[in-house]
Structures are given as C-alpha cells and as structure tokens.
C-alpha cells in the first residue's frame, strides 16, 4: 500500500470520528436545573414598641409565630422563634390563605389575592410562576395592619415584600 492510499483510508476515519464526537456532545444534557422554580412571599413581622419619647415605633418581632396554610396539613412554622418567613402562594389559584398565631393566643387569617404568570426558564427547569399581589385581606384579632412593600413576587431572594404589624399588647 502506498502513502496516498493510506491517507485516503484515514480521511474518512477522521471525519467519522469528528462526526461521532459532535453527535455525542449534542446528546449530552445541558446541565441540571439550578434555578428556583417556585416563588414565595418574603414576609416580615413587626411589633410596636413604646420609645423614650412616648411614641410607638415598629420593631422586628422575634416571637414564636405559628403559620399554617389554609387547606394544608403541615405547618410552615410551628415552634421556632422567627422574625420573617417565606410563604408559598398557590400557582393555580388566585387566593392563598394562611393562619397566623402569635404566642399561642387567638389566631388571625391572612389572604393574599394575586395574579399568576408563568415564565419559561428552560427546557430543563420548566416554568416558574411569578405572583402579582393585588390585595391582602386579614382578620384583626392580633394583626393591626399589613403593608405590601413589593407586589411582584418573582424570586426567593427578596425579603420583606410584605410586612405584618401586630397590635400593641
């Protein structure tokens, strides 16, 4: 066999190897999904504190607050002393309610009225739901007021999107 015929054999072999390499690389997964696909409301709890000037100011609460979703069997928080919590909103409904109980006393119910918009992240991750809070309704057993600081819930990184103020004890 001469050198020219040997080169003719190697050229198709090299081309086939390159094609197989590209095909195998194309079949590889692009990677696992590392993005958040669920979004929840960053909620902070405050209580009034009487200052030296006889004026009330809001102070971050650090009491035991029991939080349970209405229609759910599990607690979001049951025994820990917390000042904030992430509350998951329902993706396929426009209302999500929670029972919030401070110090094992009379509980309040808080209802988030929200719109849901799906956003495609990628083929691996699928979609995430972005919530737009339209209104919040609540009982006033222990809760004095609720403030929507940021109405668009698009990630799990933003804190204090909703602020809940308890009454003076």
Image (spheres, rainbow, N blue to C red):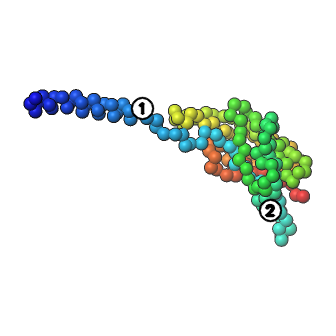
At x 24% / y 30%, what residue is drawn?
13
Is disc 1 surrounded by few (<14), some (14 to 19) or many (20+) residues within 10 Å?
Answer: few
**Distance of label 1 from label 2 (alpha carbons):** 60 Å
Report the number of numbered marks.
2
Is 5 in front, or is 73? 5
Label 1 sits on residue: 27
Q: Where is 101 relative to 55, above or below?
A: above
Is 97 in front, or is 2? 2
Q: Where is 26 relative to 39, above or below?
A: above
Is 14 in front, or is 97? 14
Quadrant hosting residue 133: top right
Q: Position of residue 2 (x, y in %)?
A: 9, 30
Secondary structure under the numbered disc 1 in the rendered image: helix
Q: Quadrant of the C terminus?
A: bottom right
Q: Position of residue 81 (x, y in %)?
A: 79, 56
The reply to whether the C-beta atoms of the residues labelled 1 and 2 are less than 8 Å apart is: no
At x 48% / y 39%, what residue is drawn?
31
Q: Is residue 79 visible?
A: yes
Is disc 2 surrounded by few (<14), some (14 to 19) or many (20+) residues within 10 Å?
Answer: few
Q: Quadrant of the N terminus?
A: top left
Left or right of 91 in this view: 142: right
At x 69% / y 31%, what residue is drawn?
92
Q: Position of residue 56 (x, y in %)?
A: 83, 63
Label 2 sits on residue: 57
Secondary structure under the numbered disc 2 in the rendered image: strand
State which tag comes first along the sequence, 1 or 2: 1
Left or right of 43 in this view: 121: left
Task: Say the numbered circle drawn on residue 137.
Answer: none
Left or right of 144 in this view: 34: left
Q: Is residue 46 visible?
A: no
At x 70% / y 45%, what residue is drawn?
41
Q: Position of residue 84 (x, y in %)?
A: 73, 53
């Amino acid at each position: 066999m001469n050198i020219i015929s040997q080169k003719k054999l190697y050229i198709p072999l090299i081309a086939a190897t390159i094609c197989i390499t590209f095909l195998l690389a194309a079949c590889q997964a692009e990677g696992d999904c590392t993005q958040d696909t669920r979004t929840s409301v960053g909620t902070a709890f405050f209580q009034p504190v009487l200052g030296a000037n006889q004026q009330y100011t809001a102070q971050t609460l650090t009491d035991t607050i029991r939080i349970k979703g209405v229609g759910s069997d599990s607690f979001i928080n049951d025994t820990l002393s917390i000042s904030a919590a992430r509350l998951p909103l329902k993706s396929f409904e426009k209302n999500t309610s929670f029972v919030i109980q401070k110090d094992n006393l009379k509980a309040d119910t808080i209802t988030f009225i929200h719109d849901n918009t799906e956003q495609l992240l990628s083929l691996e991750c699928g979609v995430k739901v972005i919530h737009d809070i339209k209104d919040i309704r609540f009982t006033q057993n222990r809760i004095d007021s609720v403030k929507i600081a940021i109405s668009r819930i698009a990630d799990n990184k933003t804190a204090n999107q909703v602020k809940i103020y308890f009454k003076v004890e």
